[in-house]
Image (cartoon, rainbow, N blue to C red):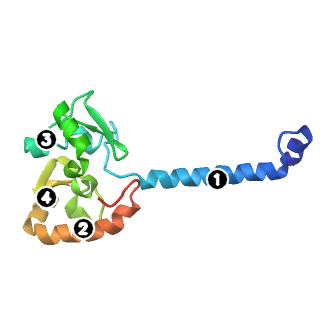
C-alpha cells in the first residue's frame, strides 16, 4: 500500500523503492563486515583505550607497565593507544607490529584452553620477544610451567578463536 501511495505522489516507484531497500541492506552488510575485518586488540570498556590505556612501548623500554598520558595517543588497528611520551608514540607509529601484544592482548593461557579472556596489563611476560598478557596470576603461573607447549596451543586456538572475535585479524 505504501509503494502505491508513493507512486501516486511521485516520490518513488515500486521498483525504485525495492532498489533502495536492497542497497540499504547491502550497505548494512558491508558495514558489519568492515567492523569485523578491522585489526583487533582488547579495549577498556570505560575508556576505550587499547590494553587499558597502558603504553605498549614502555614494556620494551622500561620493562614495566606504564600508564599512557592524556593527549599522547595514536590511532591504530581500530583502537586508540596511549603513550607515556612522544618518543614511545612515534616508535609505535613506525612499527606497531613490534609493540602490540601477541594475541591482541588476550590471555595466552586461557587461549590454550580455548577461552578468550582479556589480559590484564599488570600481568605480563615477554616470550620470544613478544608481550603476552594474562587475566590473573593463576593463569600466568600455569603458563610458566610449560610456556612452549602452552603458547603453541594458544597459537593454534587463536587461529580459530581470533576469527570469531569482533574486529580480530588473528594477531
Using the numbered discs, state the Cα–Cα distance from disc 3 to disc 2 in whole angstroms. 24 Å
Q: Which of the two labelled residues, at mark 1 and mark 3, occupies the earlier sequence position?
A: 1
Helix, strand or loop at disc 3?
Answer: helix
Residue 126 position by quadrant: bottom left
**Residue 51: x and y, percent?**
25, 45
Residue drawn at point x = 11 percent, y = 66 percent: 147
Q: How many other residues sit within 10 Å of disc 1, few (<14), some (14-19) or many (≥20)?
A: few
Can you tell which mark lies on residue 39? none
- 129 up-or-down from 83: above or below: below
Q: Which of the two labelled residues, at mark 1 and mark 2, occupies the earlier sequence position?
A: 1
Helix, strand or loop at disc 4?
Answer: helix
**Residue 113: x and y, percent?**
25, 69
Kindly check if marks 1 and 3 are in contact, taking CB atoms under 8 A apart as contact.
no
Using the numbered discs, state the Cα–Cα distance from disc 1 to disc 3 in whole angstroms. 44 Å
Can you tell which mark lies on residue 58? 3
Q: How many other residues sit within 10 Å of disc 2, few (<14), some (14-19) or many (≥20)?
A: many
Q: Residue furthest front?
A: 94
Using the numbered discs, state the Cα–Cα distance from disc 4 to disc 3 in whole angstroms. 20 Å
Residue drawn at point x = 13 percent, y = 41 percent: 58
Mark 4 or 3, which is nearer the eye?
3
Helix, strand or loop at disc 2?
Answer: helix
Residue on which disc 1 sits: 25
**Residue 48: x and y, percent?**
34, 39
Residue on which disc 2 sits: 155
Amino acid at each position: 500500500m505504501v509503494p502505491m501511495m508513493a507512486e501516486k505522489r511521485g516520490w518513488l516507484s515500486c521498483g525504485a523503492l525495492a532498489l533502495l531497500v536492497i542497497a540499504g541492506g547491502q550497505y548494512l552488510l558491508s558495514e558489519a563486515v568492515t567492523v569485523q575485518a578491522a585489526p583487533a586488540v582488547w579495549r577498556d570498556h570505560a575508556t576505550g583505550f587499547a590494553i587499558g590505556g597502558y603504553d605498549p612501548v614502555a614494556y620494551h623500554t622500561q620493562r614495566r607497565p606504564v600508564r599512557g598520558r592524556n593527549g599522547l595517543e595514536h590511532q591504530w588497528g581500530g583502537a586508540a593507544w596511549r603513550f607515556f611520551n612522544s618518543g614511545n608514540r612515534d616508535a609505535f607509529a613506525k612499527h606497531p607490529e613490534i609493540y602490540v601484544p601477541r594475541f591482541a592482548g588476550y590471555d595466552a593461557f586461557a587461549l590454550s584452553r580455548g577461552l578468550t579472556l582479556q589480559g590484564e596489563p599488570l600481568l605480563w611476560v615477554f616470550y620470544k620477544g613478544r608481550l603476552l598478557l594474562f587475566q590473573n596470576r593463576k593463569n600466568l603461573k600455569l603458563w610458566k610451567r610449560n610456556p612452549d607447549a602452552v603458547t603453541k596451543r594458544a597459537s593454534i586456538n587463536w587461529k580459530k578463536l581470533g576469527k570469531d572475535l569482533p574486529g580480530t585479524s588473528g594477531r
